[in-house]
Structures are given as C-alpha cells and as structure tokens.
Image: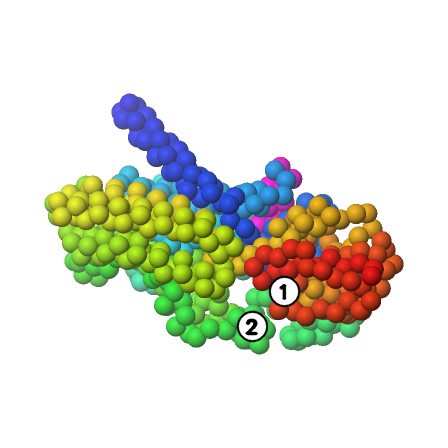
Amino acid sequence: MNEIANAGNSKWAADICALVLSFLILYLGLSFVRPLAGPDEGRYSEIPREMAESGDWVTPRLNGMPYFYKPPMCYWMGAVSIKLFGVNKVSVRLPNILMAIFGVVITYAAARSLYGREAGIASALMLGTSLFYFALSQILTLDMTVSVFMAGAMFSFIVALKRSGVWRGILILGFFLCCALSVLTKGLIGIVIPFVAIFIYACLVGVPTFFRTLKKGDIFWIFTGVVLFLAVALPWHILAVIENPPYENAGGIFSKKWEGQGFFWYYIIHEHILRFIDEETSKRGQPFWFFFALAPVGFMPWLLILPQSIREFFSEGWKSACRKTPEVLFLISWVVFIVVFFSMSRSKLAPYILPIYPALAVIAGRYVGNAWRNPERYSFRFVKYVCVGLGFLLAVATIPLWFILSHKAKCWDPHLAAYILSTCGVFLFALSVANLKIAVSGNIKKMMVSFMLGTFGFLLFFNPIAIFIQRPDSQHLVEKIKSERKEGDVVAIAYDYNSFHDVPLWLNELTFVIGVPPEEQKFGYMRERAVHDERFLSGEKEFERVVLKGSGTGFVVAKKDKALDFGSLKSEKIAENGNLVLYKVSRK
C-alpha cells in the first residue's frame, strides 16, 4: 500500500513540475520582447515602483498621489519583485505570470481530486492555453490575481466536501484564506462571489441535501477560517482608514461628491457601490449582453468541447446529475453567477470575466479525461475538423494582417513583422496538415496531443506579434531622454498622463505634468494638493517658466496629434514611437 501511495504522490509531483516548467516557458519565455501595454501595464507597474521607493506599504500611490481604486495585494507583489530584480519588463510582469501558473496548478489539483489524473492534466492545459486566460497572463492587470485567488477559494470548497479529516479542515481554511487574499486584491467581490455561488449551489442540490454534506467538525474549522479571514483582510483596511480620514468639508456617507472624503467613502461608496450602479461614475458602460457574448470567445479553442461536456453531465437527467456529480452544478453556478453579476454592473471591462475560466476548464477537462480513458466511447468528429479548419484559417489570416498593420503604419519594422507573421503562418499551415492526417486516422489520443502542442506553439507567437498590434510604450522615448539629459533638465508629460504611465517607471522618478490630473487621480490630488501642485502646470507657458528657472532645457512627451506651443523656447522632435513623440525644448 505504501508503494502505491508513494507512486501516486510522485505522479502528483511530476505532473505539477511538468506543468510549472511548461507554462514558465510559454508565459515567461518571450514576455521580455513586448512593450508594456498601456495604460494598464504602465499603471500597475508604476504603483509598485513608487511603493518600493517610498516604503509606504499602506497607501498605494500613482504619480505620487494616493490611489485607492483597488486594494494593494498586487502592488505588494510587484514592489517585492522590483526590489529583487529591478525595473524591467520581466520583473514587473513576473507576479502576474506566477499567479497565472499557480491558477493552472490549482485547477489541475482540483480536477484531479474530483475526477482523476487525466481530467486534472486536461483541465490545467485547457485553462492555461485558453485565449483569454493566456492573454491576461501576459498583460499585467489585477484580474488574473483576483481570479486565481477566487478559484482557489471555490475549488477548496468543492473539494473539501469530498474529503474528511485534516485535509477537509485544511481546505476549509484554504477557502477563507483565498477569500481574504481576493478581498486584498480587488475588494469585496473576493468574498461576495464565492459565498453567493455556494448559496446558489445549495439551492440547486437542495438545502437539506447540502447541509447533510457538512460535518460537526466543520464548525471548528469554519470558525478558525473566519478568524483567519479577518486576520488577513482587515489590518490593511483599518490602517488605510486611519491614515486617510475625511476632511471637515466632506459630504455625507451617501454623497456622490468626492471632495474632502476619506478612504472609507472612496473605497466602499465610490468604488464598490457607485461604480456598480452608476454609469456616470464608472464611465465603462457596455450593453447588458456584453459578457454573454465575450465569455464563450475567451475559452477558445476549447469552447468546442463544452457543449458535449455539459450534455454528458445531464445525459441521465437532473436527479442523476445531482446525485452522481453535484460538483459540476457548483462549477456551472460559479460560471453563470459571475456572468450575470458583472452583466448587471454599470462598469464593464473585458478582464472582469476572467474568473469563470478555471470552472469551464474543469467542466471540459472532466469530459476529455473520460475520453482519454475510454477513447472508443467518444467521438470528436465535429470538433476535430473545426479545429483543423480554424488552423488553416489562422494560417491564411497572417497575410491580410500584415497588410492591415502596414497600411495603418503600425509596423515600425515591416520586414521584421513580415518575418514573424510568415513564420507563424507556415507553422500553422504545417500543423493543420499534420492535424488533418491525424483526424482522418481517427486516433483520438494522438489528436488531443497534437492539438495541444499546436496550441502551445501558436501562443508562443503572441508576444512577437503583439509588438505591432498593441499601443506603443514610452521606454524608447525615456532611453532617449536619459542619453541626452543633463543636471537641471526637467521632464514633463503633456496633457494625457494616462498614455504615459510608464514614463516615471522607466525614468525612475516623477515628472511634471502639463494639464490637470486625470479623472482617476483627482481624489488623490485633492487629498495632497499642496504637496503636488507645483508639478501640475496649467499649460506650455508655465512649463516655459519652469525650464527657464532651471538649466534652460526640458523634455516633453506628448501625443503626435497634440499641437504644442512653448513660446520663447526652441523645440525639436528628437524621437517618436507610434503616436508618441518626444520633444526637446531649450533657449533659442
């Protein structure tokens, strides 16, 4: 028996090591070639840089000012990475990438615990290579981290129901710990979504049936878990309230006006309530059906397997499904509630939907795992030929994509773009031919392996191709500033700070800003206006005075379509990157 247990444990370890290594190569391998995607990657890199520099781990700051849009968990991780590895494209993205890999691992662990090793491997691979999950592993936002912690909470819950003894207790504690970390990442949704999903699941299986799955010993673990949750989630919130109280001129707690308000109003009322119910506050309105349309696309190419997976679950009827595999009902509740919840919100951004994909991966992974064990009972005829056709379509699409990029002047190096896209096209065409042969042979296992390896190969082209598709960053312009700057020279961002979040990041210092603070920074500016007023200049004339007070030379980053007049100063364009331009201004 011990030999069998050791063999099982070694397979767990071997599988996890293989997954971690594979996704490190996929996620981290070429992440250094792509510029930071603005504005999100610039913003969520600069906040940790300022935190690491200031040593203030309670009040996140952007452009030197308090920034309470979200809690600090991701900023803490980013600041640690910057302290360890300095400021570069890999270090600022590393926490996000490691969280994405952790999400793949916990999905493997949950699916394997519920449905066996084959389902665990399939679920992990499909999650890690699904379109939206992969894309957000590469683009630094807060959504990957909160999605992984949320998945950790909900996986802990559903697996705990299948366990007993110490492992059950550890999973219950894991549920509360992950909820706390979710709250520290993106606020109250970190606890609201898991608990509502559990409530819906209890209603679906029947409340009496649900309570029969609980045990007397759970009371101790749940109480300890609540204490753990409070110990992890509360301290930062309390410190933030203490350090950022309202001013005397603050309106009431239910006011929509932010002037004079403190952390509690802004964080709870503005960010959690007004942003959800008031489109004027969120400024991110989309139609109700937005997430219903987006959610399926994000699970490509594995979306094609989902209908068969769900049909198999319900093949013997509702009662049989509830009795044999009730955890699938929880996974479905998890997905449906998140889609409906964010569809009701007045604030809609594509990354909000990311938390559904671990659950979808396990639903599909269960089906694929069954097919791997019993290939003679499963047919993927429709799926395999659609996947082959999709491969040929993507291979051909690289040609018009190059012409479109060239026509829109996005290819700063058309020859390099042509090389990357043609290589991608040839790879996809050769892969599709190979997959077609395998599909005709009818060998399901070979087909699964071939499609997965092909998906891995295709995703390796994401970062090189994204160089020409995404908005450019400011690193090239800042390198030019550093090469020409002398002591006393000043640097300013002209009018559109949101497009230049990464200028202070690469410069490693705050800059002057021509124009008023962006809307999202007005709350922080209001709280410390006296400290930062001198950095905000009303226009080019005021910048002219700042330059003349110093060495007489300044650098201004601006949008290409923004006309600037520096009065008596001589200005020349010394660098540009896409629609971003760097001017050097000096005495005539």
For the residue labelled by badge 1, is the local secondary structure a helix, a strand or a loop?
Answer: strand
> Which residue matches tag 1?
559
- The correct choice, above or below, for 124 with respect to 347 in the image is above
- Percent of width and height locating residue 428: 30, 49
Whether residue 39 is visible to the viewer of this picture, yes or no, is: yes
Which residue is at the front of the view, 47 or 546? 546
Q: What label does residue 283 carry, if any? A: 2
Q: Which residues are magenta?
A: 74-84
Amino acid bearing label 2? Lys
Residue at 65 percent of width and 75 percent of height? 256
Figure quadrant of the C terminus: bottom right
The secondary structure that dominates the magenta segment is helix
Determine if the magenta segment contains residue 176: no
> Residue 364: x percent and y percent?
28, 52
The reply to whether residue 9 is visible in this rendering is no
Residue beneath the point at 70% across and 64% down:
494
Q: Where does the N terminus fall, quadrant-wise?
A: top left
Q: Residues within 10 Å of mark 1 (few under 14, many from 20)?
A: many
